[in-house]
Image (tube, rainbow, N blue to C red):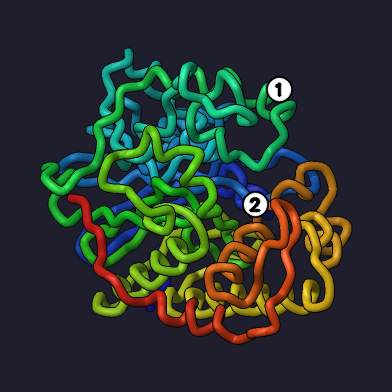
Amino acid sequence: MGEPNLEIIRPGDKSGNDMIVKIALPSGRDLLAYATKNQYSEEWDLGPTWNYLVLGDRPFLVDTGGRSQGKNLLAMMAHTGRTVHDLDFILLSHGHEDHDGGLAEIVGSAGGNMIVKAHAVYERLIRIYPSQTPDGTHQGFPASCRHCPMPESFSRKWCREYHQERSELAIDCFNGSAASPDSGIEVFHTPGHSPDAVAVLVDREAMLVGDSVLPDITPHPTRESFFELTKDVLPAEYVEAQQLYGLRAYIRSLNVLRRISESPANLVVLPAHRLYYNGTWNHLDPATRIDELIGHHITRCADILDIIRHEPRTTEEISRAYFEPNLLKGVGINMANNEVASHCELLRISGDAVFVDEERVVATGIEGRFEALIRDLGEGGDQVYS
């Protein structure tokens, strides 16, 4: 796989914050990459969000950074001689705050006359359904918050205005009959990390993978149980949890991305985090990195089985036995519990574990099925949106 032809337009700090880079593709198309800050606390640093301006006959921006970064992103665009009025549309890789948080500000700077493209699942999940919010979930928040791992106190402090802003936006949804956004552009649905996640293939020379494939860190998965919390608002074609949520969906998406990356020569893979981090460029070979990610989930399932082998454990007990204490500080415990629950779901589906009540899980003594299940998830067709 190819290493990008990079030109640093503006340097950033050692993590890449505020860096601007031009990426030249062999076809002659250029991409501009803008690294917007994305650090919520000292304990939780993914590195900046990399937002990509894809140039061409119909220039478009992929992602808009976090909620406090819209104005900064516009300033970075201005540094490269671009304004919001040069954009034909904005395309969202998925609906997490560090990717669409700056969206409302950027759309507002265009006078509200900006086309925003996203997967149809995104459009359904950003809306607020006051009469349909299930008990025990974030009341007064959109459907996406029904499965947020953060405590409601966190959401009410940091997220309310963000959710209100994006819930009012018009979205041009991807579907099988949509017109091509530009010659040479293909968009693939890659759920698992987020049910609405997409990857963007540019001229079969570069692939923008959002958070689905990251260097150095492993994207956290969703859980299949989230489907029950959102199925009432999802498009009708989604009838099974594994179509959108959980480790099964995520690993299938990884295999879709692997197949996409097999045929183009010297494909450049551009992640949404840690393209540059700790003073180092992280160039991705997709096949190698996807194998590492799948291997990581196999190892984690095996480790969880060891923890629950002799007695039932709750997800939090497993998290505290598995993760280093420094990773569980603050909201880290919420993220850890979510990841453990996702792996326990897959162990239950494979038959290697069973839930003895609503909170505890224990090994069945029949081991090894989870690995076979994971390795069999490469089958299935690609879902392509143009």
| Quadrant that contains the N terminus | bottom left
Residue type of the residue flagged with mark 1: Lys
Q: Toward the viewer: 48 or 67?
A: 67
Q: Toward the viewer: 288 or 276?
A: 288
**Could you tell whether 342 is left or right of 304 in the image?**
left
Residue 157, label in figure? 1
For marks 1 and 2, the one nearer the N-term is 2
Within 10 Å of disc 1 (Cα), the crowding (few <14, some 14-19, many 20+) is few
Q: Position of residue 362 (x, y in %)?
A: 74, 69
**Could you tell whether 54 is left or right of 56 in the image?**
right
Q: Residue at x 83, y 59 (%)?
A: 317
Q: Toward the viewer: 292 or 17?
A: 292
* Mark closer to the observer (1, 2): 1
The answer to whether residue 4 is visible is no
Q: Badges 1 and 2: C-beta atoms under 8 Å apart?
A: no
Residue 128, label in figure? none
Q: Residue at x 85, y 66 (%)?
A: 321
Please give the count of numbered marks on the rendered protein.
Answer: 2
- Residue linked to disc 2: 46
Residue type of the residue flagged with mark 2: Leu
Q: Position of residue 116 (x, y in %)?
A: 30, 31
Q: Residue at x 78, y 72 (%)?
A: 308
**Could you tell whether 352 is left or right of 379 in the image?**
right
The answer to whether 267 is drawn above or below residue 225 in the figure is below
The local secondary structure at tag 1 comes to helix
